[in-house]
Amino acid sequence: MKIITVNVNGIRSAASKEFFKWMAKQEADVICLQETKAQEHQLTAEIFRPAGYHAFYHDAQKKGYSGVALYCRRKPDKVTMGLNWPDFDSEGRYVQADYGRLSIASLYMPSGSSSPERQAVKFDIMARMMPLLKKKRRQKRDYIICGDWNIAHKQIDLKNWRGNQKNSGFLPEERAWLDELFGAVGYLDAFREVNQQPDQYTWWSSRGQAWAKNVGWRIDYQVASPTLRDKIKSATIYKAQRFSDHAPLTIEYDYDL
């Protein structure tokens, strides 16, 4: 089973940069998109209904903002849009596909970098998300929650960690939240299960020459249930082409969907 996750920073923009041409060659089972920045009724072109896939879009109410999507090779048993949190769901931040006892989700956690008010929103969502993730851990299901979590976990996960300790995405409270998620709660950072190398990033600022110099952040994850630990086979970050300010993260699992 191959799963790809990528923040496309505008699905129509990514399409113009040949994202779908690249995607068609990957033969992935599930592709998780974040920040589609479109309403489904605007995506009438065939390219947005990729051949061989079932497409599921969960849009933000605000046009040109947020939004998540799933492309599934096999039709899911069930698809769930949102978390039944009106404020969160109105921003189009979660869609989940169920296959037997496995759930695969596309998640777009809020960013707090634009203002103190949005950071407060981010902390509020984090506070609500942790009990939900704990509840999911108690269920007899396997989860792979893919997406832009908007937090770099450890110093190895961003280039300029010293200068970003007071910035959203690397605040002590945010890192402690991931410590709990990957520690006491027991979820896996699937990428780090198979790749412990430095300089592995999935997002680069548009300022300066961040991309050229690989001054990046690893804020895109596939967060997996601990029952899947031995099934994580490989993880790659694709950088040969640029489809957005994020790079696609592909992880292969020894799991029959």
Image (cartoon, rainbow, N blue to C red):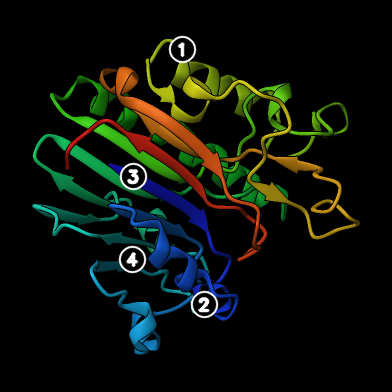
Q: Amino acid at mark 3?
A: Lys
Mark 3: secondary structure: strand
When asked about the image quadrant of residue 91, the answer is: bottom left
Mark 4 lies on residue? 58
Mark 1 lies on residue? 183
Locate the C terminus and report the quarter of the image it occupies. top left
Q: Amino acid at mark 4?
A: His
Asked if the residue under mark 4 is in contact with the one under mark 3, i.e. CB atoms within 8 Å, the reply is no
Mark 2 lies on residue? 15
**Is 209 in front, or is 2?**
2
Mark 4: secondary structure: strand
Label 3, label 4: how far apart the Cα atoms are: 22 Å
Which circle's residue, 3 or 4, is located before the other in the chain? 3
Label 2, label 1: how far apart the Cα atoms are: 38 Å
Residue sitting at 27 percent across and 44 percent down? 104
Which circle's residue, 4 or 1, is located before the other in the chain? 4
Mark 2 crowdedness (10 Å alpha carbons): few <14, some 14-19, many ≥20: some
Which circle's residue, 2 or 3, is located before the other in the chain? 3
Mark 2: secondary structure: helix
Mark 3 lies on residue? 2
Label 1, label 3: how far apart the Cα atoms are: 25 Å
Mark 4 crowdedness (10 Å alpha carbons): few <14, some 14-19, many ≥20: many
Q: Amino acid at mark 2?
A: Ala
Label 2, label 3: how far apart the Cα atoms are: 21 Å
Residue sitting at 59 percent across and 19 percent down? 176
